[in-house]
Amino acid sequence: MSKEQKTNAMRFLEKNKIAYESQSYQCDEFIDGITVAQKLGQSLDETFKTLIAHGKSGQYYCFLLPVAMELDLKKAAKSVGEKSVELLHVKDITKVTGYVRGGCTPIGMKKQFMTVVHNSAEKLPEFFISGGRIGLQIRLSPTELVRSIRGKFEDIASGVKDF
């Protein structure tokens, strides 16, 4: 029986004594968050995606929101004190974060970016986020996550995706 390989995210959580559970799923390449949630039987409201954006200032930011919601760029910019933000191009994700598309998580990146979590997570006892690689989810307390990375909760989403 092989031991699960720890990701930077898992090492960060263990070092900071934050309780979490990991859940693996079979996947060889990127699949969207809605598909992951459905595959694992998770609520779309409790499964969050991680998006990286950059502002006019050149700073990078991390945004977490339910997989069925869209990031509202104006709300996101306001939440981090920028005039505007743009999503990072897929080809730049690994270079900036150290993670691949579909495995990006707000913890254990090359550099800790200011992180804003959609305020719907504030009332959840636990939620699911990427575990730091494709095929791995982590379930943990949103409040503990935000506290450990000095993030914040705000309304950064608009509407619901069609699926």
Image: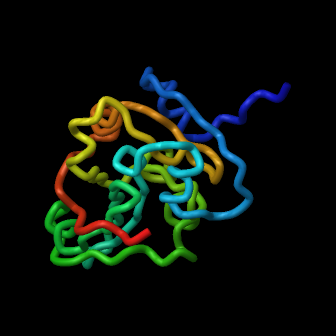
| Residue in view at x 53 percent, y 73 percent | 92
Which colour scheme appears in the figure?
rainbow
Q: Taking 85 as reference, is 133 left or right?
A: right
Q: Is residue 139 above or below residue 53?
A: above
Residue 76, given in percent of the width and then of the height, sits at 22, 66
| Residue in view at x 60 percent, y 63 percent | 31
Q: Taking 24 as reference, is 139 left or right?
A: left
| 20, 112: nearer the viewer | 20
| Residue in view at x 65 percent, y 40 percent | 24
Q: In this view, does 66 lie above or below 24?
A: below
Residue 149, given in percent of the width and then of the height, sits at 33, 40
| Quadrant assignment, res 121 | top left
Residue 21, given in percent of the width and then of the height, sits at 53, 28
Q: Taking 141 as reference, is 29 left or right?
A: right
| Quadrant assignment, res 3 | top right
Q: In this view, does 103 lie above or below 30?
A: above
| 4, 23: nearer the viewer | 23
Q: Taking 111 as reference, is 32 left or right?
A: right
Image quarter (top left, top right, bottom left or bottom right) of the C terminus: bottom left
Residue 126, given in percent of the width and then of the height, sits at 36, 32
All told, the count of numbered labels is 0
| Residue in view at x 34 percent, y 72 percent | 54
Image quarter (top left, top right, bottom left or bottom right) of the N terminus: top right
| 90, 41: nearer the viewer | 41
